[in-house]
Image (cartoon, rainbow, N blue to C red):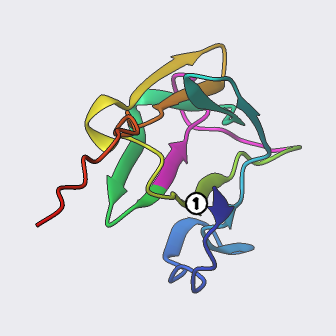
Amino acid sequence: MAEQTVAALEAQQSTTESMRTQERYVAPPVDIYETPEELVVLADVPGVTQEALDVRVDKHVLTIRGQASQGVPGEATAWEYVLVHFFRQFALGEQVDPSQITADLKHGVLTVHLPKAQAAPPRQIAVHAA
């Protein structure tokens, strides 16, 4: 599994504050583990809810996109930090079975399970002489 190079996302204008003129997207930090049965991707996406998270596979490319939100009622009067939106893509090899992929979100950590495709077992081919 290799990271897919993507063009920068179009920045969108924000009307919340004049100093914040563009939304920012960053690549979430990930850890990737391999077991005999699957690849496991752990991505840190703080501030992203299940509803604001988009995980998809298209043409053997895994895309993780998340829209972070403060999650507090009311309008903020001052900010000392800003949550950013997340976007990252990975090229998947033929070894991953896209129909069996699952994902879980818990405490700001996204866990994506990428089961390996079952390889056809080797078999002996009988040779017939004429």
Query: Which residue, as the protein is rendered here, is positioned at the far right?
Result: 80
Picture layout, residue 20 above or below residue 65: below
Above or below 126: residue 23? below
Q: Residue 79 appears in which quarter of the rendering?
A: top right
On the image, the x and y values in percent for residue 64 come to 51, 50
Residue placed most toward the observer, 108 or 16 = 108
Quarter occupied by residue 22: bottom right
Q: Residue furthest left?
A: 130
Instruction: Pick out the residue farthest to the front.
Output: 130
Left-right relation of 79 to 70: right
Give how far across and how far down residue 40 sits, in percent: 63, 29
Does residue 96 appear to the left or right of 86 in the view shown? left
Q: Residue at x 51, y 78 (%)?
A: 13
Three-letter residue code for mark 1: Phe
Quarter of the rendering containing residue 18: bottom right
Query: For mark 1, what is the residue?
Result: 90
Magenta region includes residue 78 = yes
Q: 31 above or below 83? A: above
For label 1, count other residues whose C-alpha is less than 10 Å away and answer few (under 14), some (14-19) or many (20+): some
Residue 42 placement (x, y as % from top left):
69, 31
Report the quarter where the C terminus lies: bottom left
Residue closest to the eye, 38 or 84: 38
User: Relative to the observer, which residue lies in front, 122 or 21?
Assistant: 122
Measuring from the top left, give residue 92's x and y in whole percent. 51, 57
Q: Residue at x 57, y 86 (%)?
A: 7
The residue lying toward the viewer, choosing from 92 and 108, is 92
Q: Which residues are magenta?
A: 63-79
What is the secondary structure assignment of the residue under circle 1?
A: strand
Residue displayed at 53% across by 70% down: 14
Q: Which quadrant does the N terminus fall into?
A: bottom right
The structure residue drawn at horizontal position 51% and vertical position 58%, both measured from the top left corner, is: 93
